[in-house]
Amino acid sequence: MTTTTRIRTSPARPAAVARRPWWRTRTAAGLAYAAPTAVVVGLLFLAPLGLVGWMSLNRWPLLGDAEFNAPANYEKVRDDPLFLDAAVFTLKYTVLVTVLLSAAALGLALLVQERRRGTGFFRTAYFLPGAVGFAAASLLFYGLYSNEFGPLDTILQRLRITDEPVQWIGTPNGALFSTIALVIWRFAGFNMLILLTGLQSIPGELYEAARVDGASRWQMFRRITLPLLRPTIALMLILSITGSLLAFDQFFILTNGGPDNSTTTLVMVIYRNAFFRFDLGGAAALSVVLLVVLVGLNALQLRVLRRGDD
Amino acid sequence: MTTRPLRGRRLGAQLLAAGVLLAGALTACSDDTGGDGKEAAGVNGTDDGTTITMWTRAATQTQSERLVKQYNATHKNQVKLTVIPTDNYQPRIAAAAGAKQLPDVFAADVIFVPNYTSQGLFKDLTDRISRLPFKDALAPSHMELGTYEDRLYTLPHTLDLSVIFYNKDLYRKAGLDPEKPPKTLKELAQQATTIDQKLGRDGKVNGTFFGGNCGGCFVFTFWPSVWAAGGEIMNDDGTRSQVDQAPMTEVFDIWRGLYENGVTGPTTKTEQGPTWTGFFPKGTVGVMPMPSTTLGLMPPSMDIGVTPIPGPDGGESTFVGGDSIGISATSDHTDAAWNFISWTVSDEAQTEVMAKNKDVLARTDLADNKYSAADPRIVLINSLVAKGRTPYALRFGQTFNDPQGPWLRYAREALFGDTGKLPELNKAVDSSLKQ
């Protein structure tokens, strides 16, 4: 806006600017450039968001007319014991996955940080699982863990490590950690890539200077690598936390929320309400609650991150 | 300044593109609800070369495919069949209904039909069905569940009954008489235990098996024992649970004993459903309840006996499962769709497609036909259609089939866990049914 004003008040070409029709001004051009994205965002994001908000205030049948019933759907969310269990489990899973995944990704990134013979191969190898679709990867692990046709049990029994089938996804903890193993396998390489870009932007002179000053490897890691990697780590944390709070595919395919609802995530509760119980209004209310929590969490994370930059 | 006109043109193109996008999206959202066309089309609907879209679930894919193939070969109308994985079928139907994108015709697990009819997903076919000459011979439990507030919405599509399969070779090896299958559930437990003790020492053969983390499997395989003993699972309108009463408790106790004694195989407790029928064909299970539709898929060399599911002390019953088929409420091709679905229950389709392939028939008047006599096991299964039951409840799926539903928790505590928790969990089953 300031540039437009400056052009208009410029004494050199006032007449030319004044005569230019509105659709040839810079403001109009700017709006036009933004329009396609604005339409897409409006149509595919804002409109559905508004619809979800409106649905959450109505009894919304599969076919037929909606009926305003606010705040009944939100009261149902509050009174649903499965919702509370799922919220606790989702938080537990998020913390575990974020910590383990970050540690694994950082370890991998440090391993392949420097250019030596074979780093290219290892970088590709670590990243490769990221090229498998997540649902396909979940199915793959389902097969791997299967007691009926999975190879893991056979191998462990041949090696005489176990003498009967392991219940990979048959116990609450087994199911949780089997899923976490899948998530780390699938995402560690991708997070490694994010961290690598951060690592490579740290100037080599810093390490050289530290070495001259007689710093140990650990001191260099703590005083140089970690502080300068902070923005990259923050990005990785945001991606991992948001992704984990929205976890669905892996549990839906691998554990089906079981055994005994021990691995049911919030999004699975939404899915169940919408598509098994046909309670679209209740599912919308749950989605709104989850959205508010997520926006709040992301705002908090960004604030912490910005403070670190100052 | 020479760039100005160009920019203007580019701007125009962008606005146009945005407009096209918008228009496309609006058309996609538009409402295309159609009414129930002309009633004048006659008993058999119309066969005028219409393309009819149809969905079915993978569990009954074979039967649907055979019917569609035969219909397309003999009619001008053409059915386009889409098969959807069984576990995702219900959500897909729900999503499609919400977007008014249902196919013309869809089959559904008979147990979910009351919920669909109450949600208005199927067209009212009362008048058309009443005019069928064989309407009284249509599989009774399927017809009952397709009736909502005295109106008829669906026809039986496929029938899948739960029956006991037993491996005659293993019976012989264990010293049991292969011509004396269990007449009571207690006898089944004894025979399974004998097989397990005599042949199961290396862990490869097990006496019996059941899907221990699969709500639908319990419904399908355990409930017939309750009915066989004269018991009930719910009250008549499916709003009150009686799962905490005998004979259900007795049935749970027998299976719990088999699990605790290691007769059921190590993966029983974790079996979620997709592979529960996979063990018997391998020849590693002595005796277990199985779906009748899998009989045609057993290895030809296996010597398999079939017998009805008994109660704890005798009697016999079966769960009449399978699919019903109806015309979706939003279809514009009612007459053509009726032509197809009424043909699927005709003499021709039932005998030359279903009976010929050893499937259970949707009509009781055709049970005795030129194909069924060849295999006494098929005659037995066909005879069970009239004795079997299909339970009715509006909230069936979310209570009994849903892995997060209350029934699975209940059954697992009853079989593997703490029976002290059962009264509390029964309340959860109850309130889910009442919703």
Image: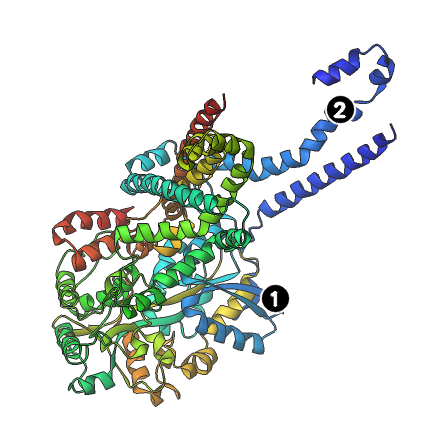
Q: Mark 2 points at which residue?
A: A26
Left or right of B294 on screen, residue A116: right
- Nearer to us of marks 2 and 1 is 2
Label 2 Cα neighbours within 10 Å, binned few <14 / some 14-19 / many ≥20: few
The quarter in which the N terminus of chain A is drawn is: top right
Residue A61 at least partly seen: no
Left or right of B202 on screen, residue B275: right
Asked whether A38 or B318 is in front, the reply is A38
Residue B145 at least partly seen: yes
* Location of residue B342 with respect to A277 vertically, above or below: below
Mark 1 falls on what kind of element?
loop
* Location of residue A69 with respect to A19 vertically, above or below: below
Q: Residue B358 in the image: state x and y as whole percent.
A: 38, 81
Asked whether B255 or B343 is in front, the reply is B255
**Disc 1 chain ID:** B
* Location of residue A301 with respect to B78 vertically, above or below: above
Q: Residue A235 in the image: state x and y as whole percent.
A: 49, 35
Label 1 Cα neighbours within 10 Å, binned few <14 / some 14-19 / many ≥20: some
Residue B420 circle label: none
Amino acid type indicated by mark 2: Arg
Mark 2 falls on what kind of element?
helix
Work out how far the residue at label 2 is from the one at label 1, CA to CA, in angstroms. Answer: 55 Å
Image-quadrant location for residue B270:
bottom left
Asked whether B37 or A110 is in front, the reply is A110
Q: Residue at x 32, y 75 (%)?
A: B292
**Disc 2 chain ID:** A
**Number of numbered discs on residues:** 2
Q: Name the residue under label 1.
A: B50
Asked whether B161 or A240 is in front, the reply is A240
Amino acid type indicated by mark 1: Thr
Q: Residue A147 in the image: state x and y as whole percent.
A: 31, 65
Q: Residue at x 27, y 74 (%)?
A: B163
